[in-house]
Amino acid sequence: MVRHDAIVIGAGLNGLVAAASLARGGLDVLVLDRAAAAGGLSAEYEIVPGFRVPRYTLGSGGLPARIVAGLDLPRHGLRFVRAEGGVSFFPDGAYHAAYRDGVVHRREIARFSRRDADAWTRYRRDMLRAARGLAPLLGGPVRAPVKGFFAGLRARLDLADRIAAIAPEDLADMVRFSTLPLSEFLDSYFESPVVKAHLASAALMRGTLGPSTPTGAFRLVVPWLAETGDAMGGAPETLLPYGGPAALTGALLAVIAAHGGQVRMEAEVTDILMKDRKVRGVVLANGEEIGAGAILSSLDVKRSFLSLFQWRDLPEGLVERVGRVRMKGVTAKVNLALDGLPDFPSLPHGCPSLAGGFRLAGYIPQMERTFSDWRHRIPPRDPLVEVLIPSLHDATLAPAGKQVLSALVQFVPDALHEGAWSGERRDALGDLVIARLAEVSPGIEKLVLAREVLLPNDLEGEIGLTGGDIAYGETTLDQMFMNRPFPGMGSAETPLGNFYLCSPSAHPGPLVPGGAGANAAAHLLERRKGGR
């Protein structure tokens, strides 16, 4: 049996970060994935020949600077474009653009309320302070009491040290975020419905909380986690990998190859070999067995335990704990190939914020109704839509003069209360999104050369993501930090010897791109260094 130091299951972002980190650390690493191409959720796709778009995700975002530098990704061709914060369009014709420059951004807010323009400084200060308070908890592994008294004591002392390092005023802010609804929190700063809806819509995307759900204010901090500067600045920037997410995937693959690692596509892992409650290798769909000193799974927590193992081999109670992890589909994806650049007549000509994407947002009461539809498993009648035109900043993604459009549709249930997601209902959702786009860009429907509508169950069927949940598990506070993926685990290390979870189902979830993969790799390298 061929043997490797480590096998990583899944060639998505976190799996590749883990593999690249281990390879740079000197381990013999093999990555296995059932798909034909690497990338996972960020895999690139041609809607029609010449039009490339990330199939399942929006296409914005990057990696923390510490991971980019630690893996030396710029040396392997990775570049980022820093764009403005985007635009929110509203049904009554209003729009709100976000700017990185503090003076320009306050001037934009003053169009709706001078009082809110003044309040922005306080809001930005508090967001930066809250992000700074979360940094010690998100910047590395949370050690959970996996086994033994002393392991549990170390875990609690480690967490206590991190909490003790948080300034008292930051801790007070964290308490507010962890209790208040998003809408109530915004009411304490702003009066304009436009300003509040602009901030709320960004926070609600990809989550399972509504504007009035308690603890929802926590999600307002997420866009600020990578922001720097002081209170006098503007909105957080939008970070875009040049060449799309495929460029990020390519750079990680280059790091793995440069350090002797291997990646095998169309190699599906169906079983994990065990001995004495420790993993020792994998079995592929073709019957091939491959040995490993450690196995890291970048699959979601349910797939990692309930699909790869014989349940009788798992510790008592583990199946039940995994089964209780909440994973719910909440987004659909619409991809468009366009014959030209859409026009947005309500925006000033050449508005730079458009390159950072835009949202089709109702006001907060409308968002609450849409959230209620999702909770009752009704197809969205007035969805919240987040849109990126990645070819605006990277012309290589479409033929000359053409464009690609990537849209996430929020509050789309994975299963319906009445009936199923038929082809007719799928088409109706696509028609609804294009109709919403046409409200802010008249004539865009005539530019559509091709379209694709992907529902949550498509993500489950095509890439094996339970429920089509792109967060790999709800990001409510009871499923975060030491409770992610469930109480009693809370780290990359699992109750099974030499088996690690490196997907966003583990801490820090999707809040830090690549963070779960980096944590798992760091944990394994630390153990090997210590001879354990």
Image (spheres, rainbow, N blue to C red):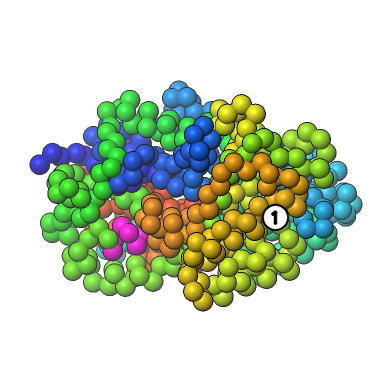
Q: Write the residue at 62% across / 56% down.
A: 431
> What percent of the width, then of the height, locates residue 283?
18, 50
Q: Quadrant of the N terminus?
A: top left
Say few, some or many: other residues with alpha carbon within 10 Å of mark 1 (under 14 / 14 to 19 / 20 or more): some
> What percent of the width, then of the height, locates residue 180?
66, 68
Q: Write the residue at 58% across / 68% down.
A: 379
Q: What is the magenta range?
A: 300-306
Q: Nearer the viewer, residue 232 or 400?
A: 400
Image position of 58 (left or right of 143):
right
Secondary element type, mark 1: helix
Three-letter code, disc 1: Arg
Number of marks in the rendered image: 1
Q: Nearer the viewer, residue 176 or 393?
A: 393
Q: Nearer the viewer, residue 73 or 123?
A: 73
21 inside magenta stretch: no
> What percent of the width, then of the height, locates residue 527?
27, 45
Residue 9 appears in the rendering: yes
Q: Write the residue at 16% across / 54% down.
A: 273
Q: Residue furthest left?
A: 1
305 inside magenta stretch: yes
Instruction: Reply above or below: 453 against 178.
Output: above
Displayed quadrant of residue 99: top right
The chief SS type of the magenta part is: helix
> What percent of the width, then of the height, locates residue 344?
77, 42
Displayed quadrant of residue 524: top left
Q: Which residue is mark 1?
A: 436
Instruction: Reply above or below: 497 against 254.
Output: below
Q: Write the residue at 35% across / 50% down.
A: 298
Residue 279 appears in the rendering: no
Instruction: Reply above or below: 440 against 309.
Output: above
